[in-house]
Image (cartoon, rainbow, N blue to C red):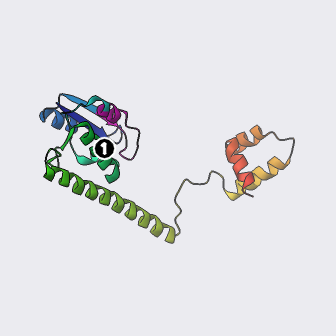
Amino acid sequence: MLVGYARVSTDDQNLTPQLEALTEAGCEEIFQDVASGAKTARPQLQELLKYVRKGDTIVVWKLDRLGRSLKHLIETLQLLEDKGVEFKSLTEGMDTNTPGGKLLFNIFGAIAEFEKDLIKERTQAGLKAARARGRKGGRPKKMDPQMVEMARSLHKNANTPVADICRTLKISKSTLYRCLKET
């Protein structure tokens, strides 16, 4: 039996093209996840792995829909092989039923991981270049130095309740205590 697996990373993305391709390929059952490939929690993938039996073939639209990394892809493929389950990727034309398909699986997995590493490297280079230009990443500070000084002076007065300080400065208690601790 052909069993499909479709995944998108966010709710904004559309599963329809994958579902249509899997249906056209003859999948009788299709499992769907909305989860980042980097996340380990993909409940429908886990259900799929429990569902398939010896002789079944898992079909995906594209190789990167199945695994988080080359290591994860290889581990999943090994698990499928141990269960007697085949794997097929429609876009790459890969079928682990053949030795060439197994080789192709490893090559495409390595390329996918290489691409992910390149993106990470470019992101890091962009952040480094921004820092060199004086730009800082991260969330902006809630309190400027003037507000911090005001919070300190209000907090020194034991008659001023913390809740009043927070309400006046429009900050949370944790922000107040964090700014007081930093000095």
Looking at the image, which residue is at 17% across and 28% down?
28
Which residue type does callout 1 highlight? Thr
Name the residue: 74% across, 53% down.
Answer: 181
Magenta segment range?
Answer: 32-49
Number of marks in picture: 1
Residue 70 horizontal side relative to residue 145, left or right: left
Residue 19 visible somewhere in the drawing:
yes
Instruction: Check the image and report above or below for 19 versus 154.
Output: above
Q: Foreground: 51 or 157?
A: 51
Q: Residues within 10 Å of mark 1 (few under 14, many from 20)?
A: some
Asked if residue 57 is positioned above or below residue 104 in the image, the reply reads above
Residue 14 visible in the picture: no
- The residue positioned farthest toward the bottom in the image shown: 132
Quarter containing the C terminus: bottom right
- Residue 116 position in % (x across, y down): 34, 57
Residue that carries the numbered disc 1 in the rendered image: 76
Q: Return the x and y of residue 173 as percentages of the image width and height.
A: 70, 42
Image coordinates for residue 79, horizontal then vertical, percent? 30, 41
